[in-house]
Image (tube, rainbow, N blue to C red):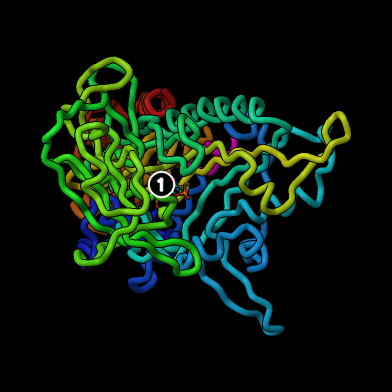
């Protein structure tokens, strides 16, 4: 395509609220456009191209893995959320509205309810199972703090898949199959990632795994072992238990735990001095939706003691109705791995995928049953699998950029090669540029032709900002039969003879 005809509004200005490289470069490079300060974005031609590339890889691998693509309605009836009990749980993250007949609706933040509703209406027998349906579709979550551009938007593109099985074993087979499929997808997309154990609510164990793109700017802290493959989100990480002696000093942290329908309880969490309360673990220990700081003077009828304190504390020290022992502290750097005794370290990651052994949580709530071989009606066993498709644009750039701009991975680049004519008034440069452009197109190579009558310096700055993997510059050495071939990563420049240019470029960009 010709640069001069495309809407690519590049800019030199760093947008006021942007602090992350991906946010800055995607806006400045004209990939996306922000709609006010609201966590809403328009995708412009370049951004849409990248989005489609990612989508294509995801779709191709899922289809190959036997999943079937569908597209569910983005607008979902509120009644389904009542049935599952998630109306309260999701709370204000759900964008709710009424239609002209006063019916209540919710913009889908995820589609378990919708998918289960579809399956309960269409699947009746074990003969129709297993089934894995997915979509690549819009989601809306009224996030409290939308930030970092596409990383945490309110409207975003997600791939969400749901599988239905006759029993847990078959669901676990599919879960393992999806873990492999996701690895293939992220490897093809060209990101450096790690699969980690994640918090999985009541299910526990290896019931949930997250796919993390490793990047210093990541919002998630991951614990990884220096000596083995173990990796876990800090929310789920475990370490070899420490042993405490009697007389150990401990602290008590009072928190307000929040439940459905606005209910709350004050709970005291008891930890060895120096340990830190891990809020997700703490929530899970008391079955709460979330925690907030409580008034220190409030009575705490429930006490949760960090399990490693075990016998070292005297439960009679607490004036409480109920006392539990649970893992509620954060793993620290330097703690030991439970699998191999190795040293645990922290690193940062961006969650781009999440796979989950769901069990019968939704099929029971919504009555999604099938008749088994004996004619007995039983709830289907489910798995659910998500990929943050629009978040991936940001994650790829967080991992692949320099001080000048984006450096796209091959599979995701909007174009594979850019032709830059240094001076459009120079007839020879223009003619050679056009010749190469049409040759590349002929060969089916995705090429962007910078045919604008701008100064060379500003065209180069745009090239660096947009970050297409390769460029060919028709410049001042053309009279000697030489042009420049650039690799965006490292801005490596090579001189190439004009006679074998087309073949040279083809070889390099397709290799
Ligand atoms: P997070 O902890 O980052 O809020 P989540 O656990 O709420 O994510 P899931 O419900 O598992 O996310 O959604 C599946 C995927 O959708 C996530 O792995 C993530 O990549 C993506 N995602 C979730 N929320 C957003 C958002 N606000 N903007 C962009 N992508 C998102
Ligand atoms: Mg979230």
- Residue 482 within the magenta-colored segment of the rendering: no
Disc 1 residue: CB within 8 Å of ligand 1: no
Instruction: Give residue 508's quadrant in the image.
Output: top left
Whether residue 388 is situated above or below residue 62 in the rendered picture: below
* Residues packed near mark 1 inside 10 Å, few (<14), some (14 to 19) or many (20 plus): some
> Which residue is located at x 40 percent, y 62 percent?
258
55 lies left or right of 325: right
> Which residue is located at x 29 percent, y 26 percent?
497
Report the predominant secondary structure element of the magenta stretch. helix
> Which residue is located at x 63 percent, y 42 percent?
162
Frontmost residue, 285 versus 124: 285
> Which residue is located at x 58 percent, y 77 percent?
97
Where is residue 88 shown, x and y percent of the image? 52, 65
Whether residue 184 is situated above or below residue 124 in the rendered picture: above
- Residue 57 within the magenta-colored segment of the rendering: yes
Q: Which residue is mark 1?
A: 284
Where is residue 466 shown, x and y percent of the image? 31, 49
State the extent of the magenta-drawn residues as a range: 54-60
387 lies left or right of 347: right
> Number of numbered discs present?
1
Frontmost residue, 26 versus 163: 163
Where is residue 337 shown, x and y percent of the image? 27, 22
Whether residue 15 is situated above or below residue 370 in the rendered picture: below
1 lies left or right of 103: left
What residue occupies the far right of the structure in this picture? 375
| SS label for mark 1 | helix
Where is residue 483 shown, x and y percent of the image? 26, 34
């Amino acid at each position: 395509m010709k640069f001069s005809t495309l809407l690519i509004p590049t800019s030199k200005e760093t947008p006021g609220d942007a602090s992350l490289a991906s946010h800055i470069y995607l806006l400045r490079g004209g990939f996306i456009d922000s709609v006010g300060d609201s966590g809403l974005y328009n995708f412009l031609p370049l951004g849409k191209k990248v989005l489609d590339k990612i989508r294509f890889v995801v779709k191709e691998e899922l289809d190959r893995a036997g999943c079937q693509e569908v597209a569910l309605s983005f607008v979902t009836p509120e009644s389904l959320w009542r049935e599952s009990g998630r109306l309260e749980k999701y709370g204000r993250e759900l964008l709710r509205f009424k239609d002209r007949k006063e019916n209540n609706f919710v913009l889908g933040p995820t589609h378990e309810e919708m998918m289960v509703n579809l399956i309960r209406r269409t699947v009746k027998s074990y003969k129709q199972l297993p089934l894995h349906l997915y979509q690549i579709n819009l989601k809306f979550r009224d996030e409290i703090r939308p930030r970092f551009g596409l990383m945490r938007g309110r409207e975003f593109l997600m791939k969400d898949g749901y599988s239905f099985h006759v029993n847990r074993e078959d669901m676990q087979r599919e879960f393992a199959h999806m873990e492999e499929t996701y690895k293939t997808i992220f490897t093809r997309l060209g990101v450096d990632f790690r699969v980690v154990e994640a918090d999985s609510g009541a299910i526990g164990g290896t019931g949930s795994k997250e796919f993390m793109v490793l990047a210093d700017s990541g919002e998630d802290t991951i614990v990884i072992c220096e000596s083995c493959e173990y990796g876990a989100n800090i929310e789920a990480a475990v370490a070899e238990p420490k042993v405490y002696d009697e007389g150990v000093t401990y602290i008590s942290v009072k928190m307000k735990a929040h439940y459905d329908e606005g209910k709350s309880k004050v709970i005291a969490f008891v930890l060895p001095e120096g340990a830190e309360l891990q809020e997700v673990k703490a929530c899970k220990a008391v079955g709460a939706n979330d925690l907030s700081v409580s008034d220190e003077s409030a009575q705490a009828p429930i006490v949760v003691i960090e399990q490693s304190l075990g016998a070292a504390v005297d439960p009679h020290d607490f004036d409480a109705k109920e006392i539990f022992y649970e893992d509620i502290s954060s793993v620290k750097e330097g703690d030991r791995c439970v699998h191999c005794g190795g040293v645990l370290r922290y690193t940062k990651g961006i969650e781009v995928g999440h796979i989950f052994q769901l069990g019968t949580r939704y099929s029971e709530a919504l009555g999604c049953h099938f008749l088994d071989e004996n004619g007995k009606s039983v709830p289907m066993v489910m798995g659910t699998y998500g990929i943050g498709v629009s978040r991936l644009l940001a994650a790829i750039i967080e991992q692949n950029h320099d001080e000048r701009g984006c450096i796209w991975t091959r599979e995701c680049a909007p174009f594979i090669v850019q032709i830059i004519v240094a001076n459009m008034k120079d007839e020879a440069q223009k003619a050679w540029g056009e010749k190469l452009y049409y040759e590349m197109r002929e060969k089916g190579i995705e090429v962007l032709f910078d045919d604008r009558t701008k100064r060379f310096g500003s065209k180069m700055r745009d090239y660096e900002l947009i970050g297409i993997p390769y460029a060919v510059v028709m410049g001042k050495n053309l009279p000697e039969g030489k042009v420049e071939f650039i690799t965006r990563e490292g801005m490596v420049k090579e001189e190439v003879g004009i006679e074998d240019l087309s073949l040279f470029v083809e070889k390099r960009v397709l290799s």
